[in-house]
Amino acid sequence: MTKYRVRLILGLAALIVPAILVGAILFKFSPSQLHLPSCSFRAQTGLYCPGCGATRAIRRLMQGDLLGALRYNSLLFILAPCVVYILAYDAYDLWRGVMVPRRGVRNVAVFCLCAIIAYFILRNLPFAWCDWLRPPDEVCL
C-alpha cells in the first residue's frame, strides 16, 4: 500500500468514526437533554449565525424528518453536496497518488463561502419572507 492510500484510509476513518459517534449520541438524546451551550454569537449580537439550529437539524434528519431539518437549518442542504464533492475529489486524488490543483474544487469552495454569507444576511433580515430561514425561537436562546 502506498503512503497516499494509507493517508486516505486514515483520513476517512478520522471523519467517519467521530461522525458515527456524534450521530449515535444525537439519535439517542435530544440536544436539550445534552445541555449543549447556546449560540454565543446570538447571545452577543442578537443575530442568527449560519450554524444556528444545525445540531437540531441533523437530529431531525437522522430521525427522517426532512421538513423539520429544513426548518432548523436549510444551509446544511445546500452545503452537504458541496462538501461531499470536495471530499470525493480529494479522496480520488489521494487514491491515485497525484495532488493536482482543481479549479472545480476551488469554485465549489467559493460558492460555499458565498452561500454562507448570503444565508447569514438573509436569515437576519426583518422581513416576513425571511422567517422560514430562521430556526424556531427555542433553539438559539
Image: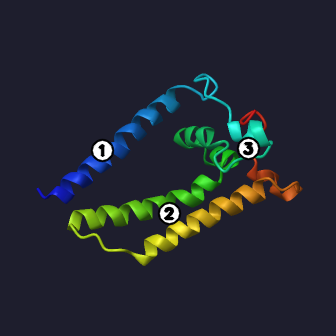
Label 2 – label 1 distance at C-alpha: 20 Å
Most extreme residue toward the front is: 44
Nearer to the camera, 128 or 96: 96
**Residue position for label 2:** 82
Nearer to the camera, 117 or 83: 117
**Residue position for label 1:** 13
Position of residue 49 relative to residue 63, above or below, is below
What label sits on residue 112 in the rendered view? none
Question: Which amino acid type is shown beneath numbered disc 1?
Answer: Ala
**Residue 29 point in image, percent of width and height:** 55, 25
- Report the quarter where the N terminus lies: bottom left
- Report the quarter where the C terminus lies: top right
**Residue position for label 3:** 135
Asked if disc 2 and disc 1 are in contact, CB closer than 8 Å, the reply is: no
Q: Residue at x 24, y 50 (%)?
A: 9
**Residue 97 point in image, percent of width and height:** 21, 66
- Left or right: 46 in relation to 55: right
Nearer to the camera, 100 or 127: 100
Most extreme residue toward the bottom is: 103
Secondary structure at badge 2 equals: helix
Question: Which amino acid type is shown beneath numbered disc 2?
Answer: Cys
Q: Residue at x 58, y 56 (%)?
A: 77
**Residue 2 point in image, percent of width and height:** 13, 58
Label 1 – label 3 distance at C-alpha: 32 Å
How crowded is the residue under tag 1: few (<14 C-alpha within 10 Å), some, or many (20+)?
A: few
Nearer to the camera, 18 or 28: 18
Position of residue 138 relative to residue 12, above or below, is above
Label 2 – label 3 distance at C-alpha: 22 Å
How crowded is the residue under tag 2: few (<14 C-alpha within 10 Å), some, or many (20+)?
A: some
How crowded is the residue under tag 3: few (<14 C-alpha within 10 Å), some, or many (20+)?
A: many
